[in-house]
Image: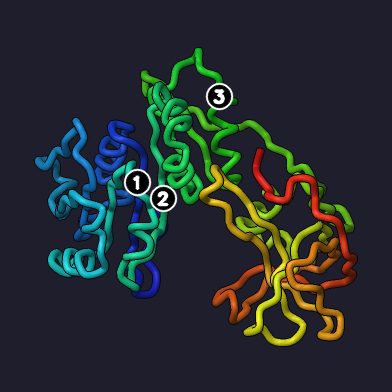
Amino acid sequence: MPAQVNNDMPVYLFTGFLDSGKTKFIQETLGDKRFNKGESTLLLLCEEGEEEYDLTLDSMKNVHIERLENESDLTEKVLDYLAKKYRAERVLVEFNGMWQTSSLYQNMPETWAVYQEFMFADATTFLAYNQNMRQLCVDKIQGCELVVFNRFEKRMDKMEFHKIVRTLSRRADIAYEYSDGFVEYDDIEDPLPFDINAPVVKVEDGDYALWYRDISEEPKKYNGKTVEYKAIAMQNKRFPAGLFLFGRRVMTCCVEDIQFAGFLAECKPSEMPTHKGWYTVRAKVSYKFHRLYRRKGPLLTVLSMTPAEAPEQEVATFY
């Protein structure tokens, strides 16, 4: 786990449904001297599981446990108060699987920064959870760095679990933990449906969602690349002349979560596209800071732009 930098309050987030193995993993992590050197640690428990923390262990001496029973307790005021109460040097959160992670992200004090996010799932019940509570699974998987499927059995098909995770994230590592404690990491390759090394990276209509996620997760690898794809041009009166948004509506898991997903594009002011018009654009990608992003992000410099017909399926999906 990374060391603290600047004045950030490091936050380590552990998500997953009830009895998915979060408590055991956190206890083991705190017992690892490479991670725990006695720092004052605030441990926030957002649900009551069957397993309890062993407070008699030396590794728990400077760990201060606070329970948050309601999602509404996740306020900046409450979180800041608890951190100051114990003069915490870092925060660990055992999150409630039935809560949206945005409840934490949107209400953290400004100095708090999530350093790592892990998702845990009981392999014997995960497929049912994903089928019946898809949106909650999406919420937990799409932001995490590691998905651990514990209680995994040899008879289970890894590909079923792999596809669910890869639909939502290409960057998350996947681990399968068997009942005997053996851990196996996922090594199934998922080649992208477009050639990232081609002189022009051509993205087909059905691959837009995958491409958008890939460039969002690894924007640096597209720096200097030329891309070509079909999408919608969106103008904004607040943008300077020659700047517009170029992207498509994307559905992650259900109709309710459809949102516009695109990037800033620049062209000659005299060649601005029609608002909400479909175009096939060839553009050079620069990974750089832009004030409208408020951070670094992909900026498209238009090389050519041709009016186009909308694809048969206007909303892009990962399926």
Q: CA distance from mark 2 to mark 3?
A: 22 Å
Q: How is the image coloured?
A: rainbow
x, y percent for residue 38: 20, 56
Q: What amino acid is at disc 2?
A: Glu
Q: Determine the residue located farthest toward the left in the rendered image.
A: 56
x, y percent for residue 246: 72, 66
Helix, strand or loop at mark 1: strand
**Residue closest to the eye, 302 or 241:** 241
Image quarter of residue 160 = top right
Residue at (68% x, 48% y) in the render: 316
Per the image, the residue denoted by label 3 is 158
Residue at (87% x, 59% y) in the render: 308
Helix, strand or loop at mark 2: strand
**Residue closest to the eye, 187 or 83:** 83
Q: Sequence-wise, which precedes: disc 1 or disc 2?
A: 1
Residue at (74% x, 86% y) in the render: 241
Residue 14, disc = 1
Per the image, the residue denoted by label 2 is 117
Density class for disc 3 (Cα within 10 Å; few <14, some 14-19, many ≥20) is some
Q: CA distance from mark 1 to mark 2?
A: 6 Å
**Residue closest to the eye, 39 or 9:** 9
Helix, strand or loop at mark 3: helix
